[in-house]
Image: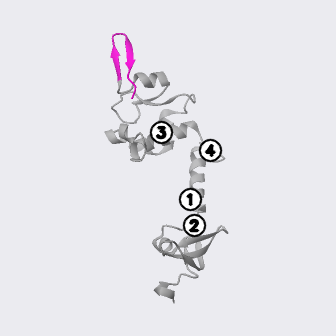
Amino acid sequence: MWHVDNVKDLTGKQFGRLLVERQNGRSKSGSVMWECLCDCGKRKTVRGSHLTSGSTLSCGCEHREIASATALRHGHSTSGRTSSTYNSWARMIDRCTNEKNNRFARYGGRGITVCTRWRKFENFLADMGEKPDKDLSIDRINNDGNYEPGNCRWATPAEQARNRSTSKKHGGGWDVEEF
């Protein structure tokens, strides 16, 4: 069955957790919108193309459940807040993989990677252990090396400063150049 403008009628069809109830207008760009009832009981209005392509399969509850299960699995999230150890891991991944990260150029942009094993938080935690103090951060011992077992430690800000690529050792001390 077709609606006005040759729009395929999605009424009564199930897409993931969403049951389409009725057409609900158009978006600003002209896409047909559909009001859906999620299995969890919430209502959500979704573009038809997002339903048929499979890019939207719930009101958002599925994503929240997966995130919650992940947090419970590694035990580093309570009441929606993540631990300092988890935050350090997530920031490490982001600066090496996300071109929009303002520090990407100094990490991923110059070829610094995170080893495959550490792409899973549980493995990172097993190798590095809990962050011993909130003032410490992950540091690469070889500043040109990757984030991987054997090349990383929890370091103080002073240790980090001495290990920067802009730091130069002179005689018995360190000179640190500002970025």
Name above or below for residue 61 compared with residue 146.
below
Mark sitting earlier along the chain (1/2): 2
Disc 1 + disc 2, Cβ < 8 Å: yes
Mark sitting earlier along the chain (2/4): 2
What is the crowding at mark 2: few (fewer than 14 residues within 10 Å), some, or many (at least 20)?
A: many
Location of mark 4 (residue): 81
Q: Position of residue 62 (x, y in %)?
A: 58, 61
- Which mark identifies residue 127? none
Disc 3 + disc 2, Cβ < 8 Å: no
- Which mark identifies residue 124? 3
| SS type, badge 2 | loop
Q: Is residue 125 magenta?
A: no
Location of mark 1 (residue): 63
| SS type, badge 4 | strand
Disc 1 + disc 4, Cβ < 8 Å: no
Where on the picture, by quarter, is residue 11? bottom right
| SS type, badge 1 | helix
- Of the pair 34 and 16, the residue shown nearer to us: 34
Q: CA distance from mark 2 to mark 4?
A: 24 Å
Disc 4 + disc 3, Cβ < 8 Å: no
Q: CA distance from mark 1 to mark 2?
A: 8 Å
| Magenta-tinted stretch | 167-179
Q: CA distance from mark 1 to mark 3?
A: 23 Å
Between marks 4 and 3 in the image, the one whose residue lies nearer the viewer? 4
Residue drawn at the location 52% of the way across and 67% of the way down: 56
Mark sitting earlier along the chain (3/2): 2
What is the crowding at mark 3: few (fewer than 14 residues within 10 Å), some, or many (at least 20)?
A: many
- Of the pair 75 and 100, the residue shown nearer to us: 100
